[in-house]
Image: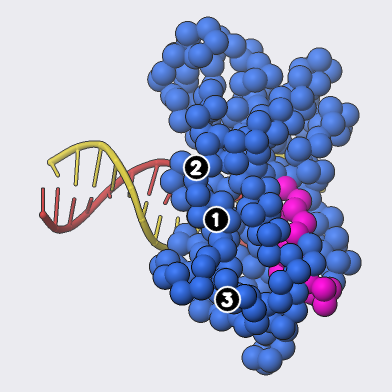
Chain colours: A blue, B yellow, C red
Amino acid sequence: MPELPEVETIRRGIATRIGIRIASVEVRRADIIAGLPESPSESRHALLAGSTIRSLLRRGKQLAIESVSGRIVLVQLGMSGQLCTQAAGAPLGSHTHVVWTFEDGKRMTFRDPRRFGGITLLESREALEAHWSSLGPDALEIGHEELAHACRHTRRAVKAVLLDQSVLAGVGNIYADESLFLAGVRPRCSAHKLTHAKLERLAAAIRSVLDEAVKAKGSTLRDYVNAEGEPGQAQANHRVYGRAEEPCLKCGTTLRKVLVAQRTTVFCPGCQR
DNA sequence: CTGGATGCCTGGGAGC
DNA sequence: TGCTCCCAGGCATCCA
């Protein structure tokens, strides 16, 4: 469930740890980590033990923790992933897979019950850029010309295009539905049929919906919490997601639920044409 | 090459 | 109360 606004909120929370040395790392479940070296001592280095966080970078739904050593821990939260800071001695939740302990005693934990997420260890900023080269531009800054380029030659449903991380990075099921509603675009509409005006409205809607959700610190439906373990508030702003069979807030038409690109999709037959 | 279908995984809710 | 079933969805992978 964490999409761009949730990951951005977590990024800002973890940023409070910049400049503080990581004293130790405990891996409780190694199979969720890609690129883990064989030797325990190299593993600790790759997971930033003994180093200090220099910066937190985000592209779409991916969060990179860059250390002063240049090594990078790339976190993908998947469906149920949580990256939290905790006080020393606070109990670890179930399904906590990695625990970093800072020199001040505070901890950072990666927890992911459903294990759709994971961690990738990278050696440098160059390796990160290579990793991110398969992603489209960050959805917070998507321009209509980039969206138009991706839509022009495909007959896919426009919602499938929005969910495609290689087109734009950061939109998941919730904000795809919200953006399409705000732009007045039908989710199943073939992408190449969208007019220039609709593409402009859609790009603007995506930026607006995501920006609003970042300001509300993300949407919490079930699992999502920020780095401090607190839920977000953006779910209060959802206009269509999770509201199937309820009246449209704009026109009163009953919102419909359909399947698009194997995803539950809610839209307003009145407003989205 | 494109794009649709499938499976991974667990917890929560519905239904009996 | 407690059991079973189904659903949620990001992403890799497979296949037409």
Q: Which residues are magenta?
A: A56-73
The reply to whether residue A116 is in sight is no
Residue type (three-letter) at the residue carrying disc 2: Thr
Residue at left 66%, top 62%? A75
Q: Are marks 3 and 1 on the same chain?
A: yes
Q: Main secondary structure of the magenta part?
A: strand
Label 3 SS: loop
Query: What is the spatial separation of the Cα atoms under label 3 and label 2, in whole angstroms?
Result: 28 Å
Q: Which residue is mark 3?
A: A105
Q: Chain of mark 3?
A: A
Q: Residue A190: x percent and y percent?
A: 70, 25
Disc 1 residue crowd, few under 14, some 14–19, many 20+, Cα 10 Å: some
Residue type (three-letter) at the residue carrying disc 3: Gly
Residue at left 74%, top 31%? A207
Q: Are marks 3 and 2 in contact (CB under 8 Å)?
A: no
Q: Are marks 3 and 2 on the same chain?
A: yes
Lower sequence index among marks 1 and 2: 2
Lower sequence index among marks 3 and 1: 3
Label 2 SS: loop
Q: Disc 3 vs disc 2: which is toward the camera?
A: 3
Lower sequence index among marks 3 and 2: 3
Label 1 SS: loop
Q: Disc 3 vs disc 1: which is toward the camera?
A: 3
Q: Nearer the viewer, residue A105 or A187?
A: A105
Q: Residue B16: x percent and y percent?
A: 13, 41
Q: Which residue is mark 2?
A: A220
Residue at left 75%, top 39%? A139
A143 left or right of B13? right
Q: Which residue is mark 1?
A: A228
